[in-house]
Image (tube, rainbow, N blue to C red):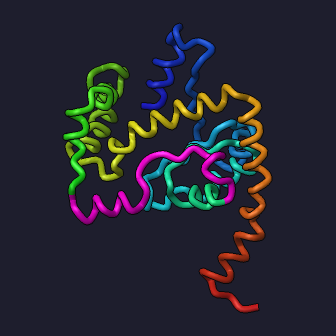
Amino acid sequence: MINELANLINNDSSLNGKLKVAFLENYNVSLAELIIPAANGSEQISLASKEASGTSNMKFMMTGAITLATLDGANIEIKDEVSNDNIVIFGMDKDDVYRHYERHDYYSRSIYENNPIIRRVVDSFINGTIPNIQGEGTEIYESLITHNDEYFLLEDFTAYVEAQEKIDQLYRNQEQWMRMSLINITNSDKFTSDDTITQYAKEIWQLKN
């Protein structure tokens, strides 16, 4: 699907010079060594409470990328180090997510039916907007709507769009962006491998000297 989406976007003349999608196969450490230092932004968008955000966002932070993220996993630690002014946080926190679990009140179809923008986005998986993805598109649509979107993506979608607009505006102010970038770099020392291994040894493995 990502390759079909890339074909669609990369061949749209109205987007020429503005947006390009590239899918890098077999992502590994060697590719990461090239990508991470070159990145201006780092998106870490797992559902709060899933603890899916790990060490990659720390590596992006160390090389000056600004994090756009949910309050999940290591994103929380990054925010604590750089403050709210130097990271872009969006969406539910873990308490919001747990309340949905406790109340069983999340209903993705209602969000889909009552938000025309979300409906247009979701329908693009099945209505031919993205060509040649009938199988994958149907699976994604059904996971979001028929099977009630177990990651609550539709609830966070509007906040995600707003976060994208915010980080776009921040990037347009290069002096502010560079200041944020430097603050991220200078506060990343907490996330060195030595400190991480020491913390794991003490708190998780409970090793004795």
Asked if 145 appears above or below 73 in the picture, the reply is above
From this view, report whether residue 76 is shown above or below residue 179: below
On the picture, is 117 further left or further right than 114? Answer: right
Residue at point 68%, 53% (across, down): 82
Residue, far bottom? 208
Q: Residue at x 58, y 38 (%)?
A: 25
Rendered residue at 22%/62% (across/down): 103
Q: Nearer the viewer, residue 46 or 96?
A: 96
Magenta run includes residue 80? no
Q: Position of residue 52 (x, y in %)?
A: 50, 57
Q: Position of residue 123 (x, y in %)?
A: 28, 27
Q: Which residues are magenta?
A: 81-104
Q: At which x and y percent is residue 26? A: 59, 43
Where, quadrant-wise, is the N terminus in this rendering?
A: top left
Q: Nearer the viewer, residue 35 or 58?
A: 58
**Most common SS among magenta residues:** helix
